[in-house]
Amino acid sequence: MRPSLLAAVLAALIAPSVHAQAPIDAAAAANAVQPRVLAWRRDLHQHPELGNHEVRTAKVVADQLRRLGLEPRTGIAHTGVVAVLKGGKPGPRIALRADMDALPVTEQTGLPFASKVKTTYRGQDVGVMHACGHEAHVAILLGVATALAAQKENLAGEVMFVFQPSEEGPPNAGETFGAKLMLDEGVFRDFKPDAVFGLHVWAGLPVGQVGVRSGPMLAAADEWTLTVRGRQTHGSRPWDGVDPITVAAQILLGTQSLIARQVNIAATPAVLTAGQFNAGVRFNIIPDEARMVGTLRTFDTAQREDIIARFRRTAEDFAHASGATATLDVAGNAPATVNDPALTARVRPSLQRAVGEGNVVEMPMVTVAEDFAQFANTVPGVYFFVGSTSPGVDPAKAPINHSPQFLLDEASLEVGTRAMLQVALDYLQHQ
């Protein structure tokens, strides 16, 4: 072979193919879909729906997924929507999850697209608001799905988009939360991902920052109900009966001492809170019964069991001392969200590529809870926060998620889309 011909052959072998595809640019792809992400977010914010009633939201999601050429499955766990995007090349399987439900909160933001929706929740007339930012999660994941579908032939592997109902809880006490019900109904039965990823907009961080940590990140959430039974009597003659209100108040104060003096919260945080205290119907009647409802937040299973046992003993002992009875019922709503250490180590560089190394912050353990943990207990998972508070506003003073004044800086939509896209692309390409 002539030297010139040999050189040409070698050059052809080692030179990049003119048909080779450049890596997908997550920032450019996120920027391209932002007008639609913004429109979806505003539309969904104006039309919020409570858990297991996300009918309109599910239709918006399913319609867009069909426009992308996907075949969504609907009606999972009542209103959940799932679709799988198959890339043009073999590769791993991942799941990306967004929650869809709103809260029984009357909006006070003054936004031009503020919610005016009213409904009934557990017997009470309430407003409905996306006070936690779930509409942003849906819009971001639709944006990610749109960007990935446009690069379908260049993708290695498969992506399941999971739009989950009822993360905040079902409309009736005792029913199953959305993530667990989706798993119970087989969402991962035929498609078991190698990893699952989720995000949450977070008022505690400024827009532009992303927060993550390895290991325990969000607390387990238990909903507890304490029923104290006494003996009804006239309010002017308490000695003729047994006052369950006084006993319940003593138990409530005792639980605060329990956490402050009996539990090593220096090892792992724990919170025991009463959110409801109901008793009686008239000012001069001591009722038969008082009822408290609240939440327990823990990060360690052994600590959780210890606190519940101490709570039950405290309640029963106070009640017995006064001639009353106390019954404690505890329902586990979500386990602790624990980021897989190896997967977190793999994801952190992706987040740094997306938003800059200095904008990826180490999160402390946070006592809010998330049933994303159900998915992350089934396959390795990583969950991260996306800052949503505007520049010039102190995140420590901004209305926190679940506030009627919770105000999302819409620049966080692009940050969240870019971050989730980078995480997905890097994992699929084994980078």
Image (tube, helix red, strand yellow):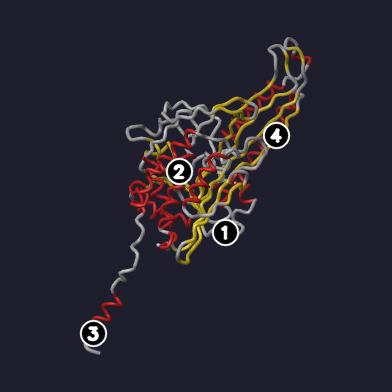
- Residue 77 image offset from top left, x and y in percent: 62, 46
- Residue 134 image offset from top left, x and y in percent: 49, 40
> Element type at marker 1?
loop
* Residue under numbered circle 3: 5
Q: Residue furthest top?
A: 236
> Element type at marker 3?
helix
Position above or below: 305 against 293: below
Residue drawn 68% across the image and 21% down it? 279
Q: Give the CA distance from mark 4 to mark 3.
A: 86 Å
Position above or below: 351 against 222: below
Q: Amino acid at mark 4?
A: Leu
Q: Amino acid at mark 2?
A: Ala
Q: Amino acid at mark 3?
A: Leu
* Residue under numbered circle 1: 192
Residue 143 left/right relative to 295: left
Residue 191 left/right relative to 412: right
Residue 254 left/right relative to 414: right
> Between 347 and 16, which is closer to the camera in this rendering?
16
Q: Amino acid at mark 1?
A: Lys
Quadrant of the image containing the N terminus: bottom left
Which label was assigned to residue 139?
2
Decide: few, some or many residues near mark 2? Use Cα within 10 Å; few <14, some 14-19, many ≥20: many
